C-alpha cells in the first residue's frame, strides 16, 4: 500500500509542473511556427524580386576588362614584439603607423616603416579582439573580453603610463568584436558578441544609437565611404550582413547567402558594394543598388575560413587572410584567384590595406605582423 | 569564429572531410596499392607524392599549395603516415600514408554536449514517436547530418539509457525527465528574433532595385587602376620596397606643388576633391573668385557638428546660424525656402543632425554647379600642367645594401608641438 501511495503522491506533486510547462511550450512553439512560416515566405518573395533584375553576371561584364598579369608580393617588414596571438590591427592616416592588439592583453603602436615600437599598453583583460587608430593619429581605441571599448590618448612622455589617461567609452553585455572611429576622434562605432552594434560619443561615453537585428554575435563592421556618410555594414555569426542607417538605427538592407559566420566585411572603395569573408571559406561581393550577392570568391582547394578581407585602392583586387595561414589575392571583376601568399606560421587573423594603398598589413596567431608590398 | 566561443566542430573539418571523401572516390579518387613498410606489406596505402599529385590535378593548384593543403590533412588526422607515425608531416616523396577510419575523424571528437543533445533527442524520439517539438525535429535532422558517422553510437546510447531508466522508480524517472527537458530548454540553441527580420524583409520588398547590367557596368576599378600602387607601382618608388620615403614626402597633405596623379584624382569625383586637403584649398580659392566661398565654409562647419563632440553641438549650431543662416548674415548661404524653414525650426531644438538637409542641399549645389566649372577653370588647368610627374627611382646598384629607414614625427608629436606653440600655430 505504501508503494502505491508513494507513486500516487509523486505523481500529484510533479504532474502539475509538466502540463504547465507543456502548454506554455506548445503556445510558444505555435507562435514560433507561425512566425517562421511567414518569414520563410517573405524571404522567398524577396529572392524572387531580387532575381528579376539580375540580367547579367559580374564576370560576364568583366570579359572585356584586361586580365591581370603575374603578381609578385613579398613580406617587406615583420613586426615582432607581441607575446601571443595578434588579433587585430589598424593603420594610422599617416600611412606608416599601425596599432595592433593581441591575446595577452597588449596593445602596441608601431612605426611599421622602421619597425620601431612607439607605445605599448597592457589592457586589464586578455583577448583584445578589437583596436582602432583615431583619425587624428593622437589616440587609439581597443577592447575585447572586458566587454568595453576604451580610448587611450597617445602620450609622448616616455615615463607616462598610457593606462592612466584611459577613457572607458563603450559598454556592451558581451565581448567587443570590432570598433572603428567615424570621421573624427569624437565618435566610435562598436560591434559585440551581445548581438548589437552601437555608436558612442567619446567625450561623454554616451550611447548615441544602438543597432539591433542580428540574431547572434556581431563579428565585424565597416563604415561606408559615401558622400553623405551615414551608413555602415556589419557581419555576424547569424551568417547575415546588415547595412544600417546610423541616424535612425534601422537596418536598411540585409544579405544572407553565406553558409557560416561572417568574420569580416569591407566596402568597395566606391561605396556601392561590399565584400565579406566567412568561416565557409568563401569571400562574397554584394552590390547595394542591385540589392544582391554578385560574386563568390572560392576554390575547392581552399577549405579554411576567411578571417579578414580588404580591397586594394582601385578595388580591383581583394585580399583575404585565411585560417590556413595564407593570403589569397582575388581579381574582384573576373572572380579568379590571382595569387596565394605564404609566410605566416599560423592563422592570419587580421588584414588591412594601408590608407594610400602602397601595402597591406596582416596580423597572425604566430605573434607577428607582416607588411606586404 | 573564436574556438573558445564557438559551438560545433570547426567548419573547415567538414570541408576537409569532403576532400577526403573525394580522394577515396572509386572512380576519381586516388589509386591505392600495397606499400612496403620494411618487411611488411600494407594494403590500401599511397605515397606522399601520390597525394600531392592528386591534389594538384584535381584542384588545379601548384605543388607548393598542394603540399600546404595536404599538410593539413595529415595534421588533422585524416591521413596518417606509416613511417614515423608520430611525425604528422606530409613528405613529397615515397613515404607511405593511409586514410584514417571515419570513427576517428576530428568532427566526432567534438565536445560532448553535441553528442549529449543528440542522445537526448534520440531517446525522446524512440520513447514516443512524434514527441519531438518543431525546433527539436530541426535540430535532430541537423545533428543527424552533421554527426552521421556516429549515429549508430547515438542510437545505441539512447537505447541503453532508456533501458536503464526503465529499471528506476517511476518517480525518479519522471524527475529525471523533467530535469533533462528543463536543461535542454535552457541550453538548446537560441531562437532567432524573427519579428525584426520580418520587418526588414517587408521593407526590402518595397525598395527600388537597379538592374545588374547597370550596377556592374561601373568602371571605378579601371579609372583608379593607375592610382593603385599595388597594381601599377608608384612613383618614384614604393617606400615599402625601396625604403625611400620620397613618395610620401611628395604626397604630403600640403606641398608647394602636388603630383600629377593627385591633381587628376580631383577630377574623378567631388568627394575626391574635398577629401584632399590641397584640393579643398584650391577649390576654396576658386570659390572665392566666384564669390561663393560661403558654401564651402558652411559645409565644413556642418561637418564639424556631425562629427564633433556632443557637448559642443548647441554652440556650433548657434555659430552657424549667426554666420550663415540669419537674415543679413555676413556669409549668408542660398538655400531653398522649404529647407530653410525646416532648418530654422529644427534649430530651436538643436541636435547632431539638425543641419543635414541644409548641408546636403549646399553640397549638391557645389557638386552640380561650382565643381564642374572648377574643373574647366584656368586655376585647375594650370595646377594640372605644373603638377610633378616623379622620375622612377632606378634600382640601387647594390640591391643587397639596405637604405637607412628614417623615422618620422608621429601625429601625436605634431599635435603636441602645435599645442605648445600656442594659438598662433597653424591649423591642420
Image (cartoon, coloured by chain):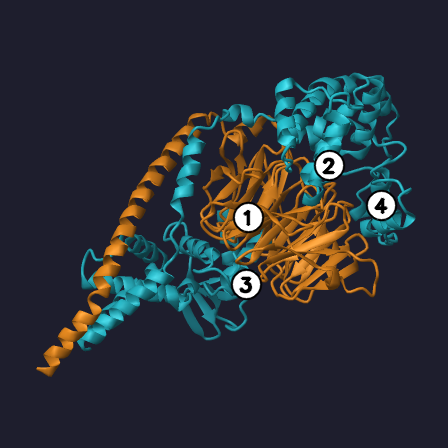
Chain colours: A orange, B cyan
Residue drawn at the location 31% of the way across and 47% of the way down: A32
Sequence-earlier tag: 4 or 3? 3
Callout 2: helix, strand or loop? helix
Callout 4 and callout 1 share a chain = no
Question: Is residue B165 found left or right of A149 in the rendered image?
Answer: left
At label 3, counting other C-alpha atoms closer than 10 Å, the crowd grade (few under 14, some 14-19, many 20 or more) is: many
Total label count? 4
Q: Nearer the viewer, mark 4 or mark 2?
A: 2
Name the residue that disc number 4 marks: B245
A247 lies above or below A131: above
Callout 1: helix, strand or loop? strand
Callout 4 and callout 3 share a chain = yes
Q: Nearer the viewer, mark 3 or mark 2?
A: 2
Q: Nearer the viewer, mark 1 or mark 3?
A: 1
Name the residue that disc number 3 marks: B90
Question: Is residue B334 found left or right of B15 in the rendered image?
Answer: right
Sequence-earlier tag: 4 or 2? 4
Callout 3 and callout 2 share a chain = yes
* Dot 3: chain letter: B
| Residue B379 spot, x, y in % from top left | 85, 20
* Dot 4: chain letter: B
Query: Which of the 4 image quadrants contains residue B9?
Result: bottom left
Amino acid at each position: 500500500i505504501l508503494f502505491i501511495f508513494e507513486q500516487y503522491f509523486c505523481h500529484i506533486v510533479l504532474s502539475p509542473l509538466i502540463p504547465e510547462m507543456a502548454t506554455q511550450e506548445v503556445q510558444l512553439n505555435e507562435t514560433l511556427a507561425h512566425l517562421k512560416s511567414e518569414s520563410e515566405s517573405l524571404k522567398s518573395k524577396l529572392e524572387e524580386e531580387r532575381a528579376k533584375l539580375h540580367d547579367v553576371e559580374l564576370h560576364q561584364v568583366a570579359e572585356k576588362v584586361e586580365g591581370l598579369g603575374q603578381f609578385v608580393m613579398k613580406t617587406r617588414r615583420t613586426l615582432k614584439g607581441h607575446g601571443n596571438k595578434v588579433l587585430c590591427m589598424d593603420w594610422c592616416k599617416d600611412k606608416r603607423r599601425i596599432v595592433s592588439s593581441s591575446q595577452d592583453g597588449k596593445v602596441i603602436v608601431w612605426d611599421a616603416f622602421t619597425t620601431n615600437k612607439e607605445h605599448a599598453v597592457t589592457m586589464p583583460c586578455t583577448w583584445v579582439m578589437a583596436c582602432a587608430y583615431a583619425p587624428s593619429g593622437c589616440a587609439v581605441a581597443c577592447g575585447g573580453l572586458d566587454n568595453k571599448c576604451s580610448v587611450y590618448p597617445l602620450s609622448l612622455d616616455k615615463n607616462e603610463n598610457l593606462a592612466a589617461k584611459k577613457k572607458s567609452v563603450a559598454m556592451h553585455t558581451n565581448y567587443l568584436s570590432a570598433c572603428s572611429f567615424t570621421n573624427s576622434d569624437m565618435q566610435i562605432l562598436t560591434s559585440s558578441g551581445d548581438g548589437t552594434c552601437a555608436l558612442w560619443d567619446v567625450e561623454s561615453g554616451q550611447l548615441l544609437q544602438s543597432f539591433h537585428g542580428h540574431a547572434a554575435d556581431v563579428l565585424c563592421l565597416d563604415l561606408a565611404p559615401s558622400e553623405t556618410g551615414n551608413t555602415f555594414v556589419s557581419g555576424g555569426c547569424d551568417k547575415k550582413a546588415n547595412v544600417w542607417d546610423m541616424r535612425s538605427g534601422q537596418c536598411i538592407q540585409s544579405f544572407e547567402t553565406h553558409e557560416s559566420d561572417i568574420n569580416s566585411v569591407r566596402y568597395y572603395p566606391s561605396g556601392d558594394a561590399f565584400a565579406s569573408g566567412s568561416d565557409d571559406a568563401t569571400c562574397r561581393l554584394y552590390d547595394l543598388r542591385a540589392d544582391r550577392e554578385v560574386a563568390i570568391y572560392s576554390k575547392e582547394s581552399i577549405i579554411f575560413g576567411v578571417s579578414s578581407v580588404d580591397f586594394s585602392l582601385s578595388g580591383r583586387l581583394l585580399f583575404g587572410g585565411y585560417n590556413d595561414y595564407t593570403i589569397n589575392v582575388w581579381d574582384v571583376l573576373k572572380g579568379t584567384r590571382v595569387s596565394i601568399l605564404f609566410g605566416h606560421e599560423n592563422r592570419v587573423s587580421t588584414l588591412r590595406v594601408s590608407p594610400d594603398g602602397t601595402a597591406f598589413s596582416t596580423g597572425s596567431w604566430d605573434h607577428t605582423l607582416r607588411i606586404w608590398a | 569564429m573564436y574556438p573558445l566561443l564557438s559551438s560545433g566542430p570547426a567548419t573547415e573539418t567538414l570541408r576537409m572531410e569532403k576532400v577526403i571523401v573525394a580522394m577515396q572516390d572509386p572512380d576519381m579518387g586516388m589509386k591505392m596499392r600495397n606499400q612496403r613498410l620494411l618487411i611488411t606489406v600494407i594494403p590500401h596505402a599511397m605515397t606522399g607524392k601520390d597525394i600531392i599529385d592528386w591534389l594538384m590535378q584535381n584542384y588545379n593548384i601548384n605543388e607548393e599549395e598542394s603540399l600546404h593543403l595536404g599538410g593539413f590533412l595529415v595534421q588533422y588526422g585524416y591521413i596518417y603516415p606509416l613511417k614515423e607515425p608520430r611525425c604528422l608531416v606530409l613528405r613529397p616523396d615515397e613515404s607511405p600514408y593511409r586514410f584514417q577510419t571515419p570513427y576517428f575523424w576530428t568532427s566526432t571528437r567534438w565536445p560532448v554536449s553535441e553528442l549529449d543533445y543528440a542522445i537526448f533527442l534520440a531517446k525522446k524520439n524512440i520513447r514516443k514517436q512524434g514527441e519531438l517539438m518543431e525546433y527539436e525535429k530541426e535540430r535532430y535532422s541537423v545533428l543527424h547530418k552533421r554527426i552521421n558517422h556516429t549515429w549508430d553510437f547515438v542510437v545505441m546510447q539512447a537505447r541503453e539509457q532508456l533501458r536503464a531508466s526503465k529499471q528506476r522508480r517511476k518517480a525518479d524517472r519522471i524527475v529525471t525527465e523533467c530535469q533533462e527537458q528543463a536543461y535542454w530548454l535552457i541550453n538548446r540553441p537560441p531562437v532567432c528574433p524573427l519579428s525584426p527580420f520580418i520587418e526588414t524583409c517587408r521593407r526590402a520588398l518595397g525598395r527600388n532595385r537597379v538592374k545588374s547590367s547597370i550596377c556592374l557596368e561601373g568602371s571605378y576599378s579601371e579609372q583608379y587602376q593607375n592610382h593603385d600602387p599595388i597594381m601599377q607601382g608608384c612613383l618614384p618608388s614604393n617606400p615599402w620596397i625601396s625604403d625611400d620615403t620620397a613618395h610620401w614626402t611628395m604626397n604630403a597633405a600640403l606641398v608647394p606643388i602636388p603630383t600629377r596623379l593627385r591633381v587628376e584624382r580631383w577630377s574623378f569625383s567631388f568627394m575626391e576633391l574635398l577629401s584632399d586637403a590641397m584640393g579643398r584649398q584650391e577649390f576654396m580659392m576658386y570659390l572665392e573668385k566666384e564669390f561663393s566661398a560661403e558654401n564651402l565654409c558652411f559645409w565644413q562647419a556642418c561637418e564639424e557638428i556631425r562629427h564633433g563632440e556632443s557637448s559642443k553641438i548647441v554652440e556650433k549650431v548657434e555659430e552657424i546660424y549667426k554666420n550663415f543662416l540669419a537674415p543679413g548674415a555676413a556669409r549668408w548661404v542660398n538655400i531653398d525656402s522649404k529647407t530653410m524653414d525646416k532648418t530654422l525650426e529644427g534649430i530651436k531644438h538643436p541636435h547632431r543632425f539638425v543641419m543635414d538637409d541644409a548641408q546636403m542641399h549646399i553640397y549638391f549645389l557645389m557638386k552640380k554647379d561650382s565643381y564642374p566649372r572648377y574643373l574647366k577653370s584656368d586655376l585647375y588647368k594650370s595646377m594640372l600642367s605644373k603638377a610633378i610627374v616623379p622620375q622612377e627611382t632606378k634600382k640601387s646598384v647594390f640591391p643587397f645594401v639596405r637604405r637607412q629607414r628614417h623615422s618620422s614625427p608621429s601625429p601625436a608629436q605634431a599635435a603636441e608641438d602645435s599645442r605648445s606653440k600656442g594659438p598662433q600655430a597653424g591649423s591642420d
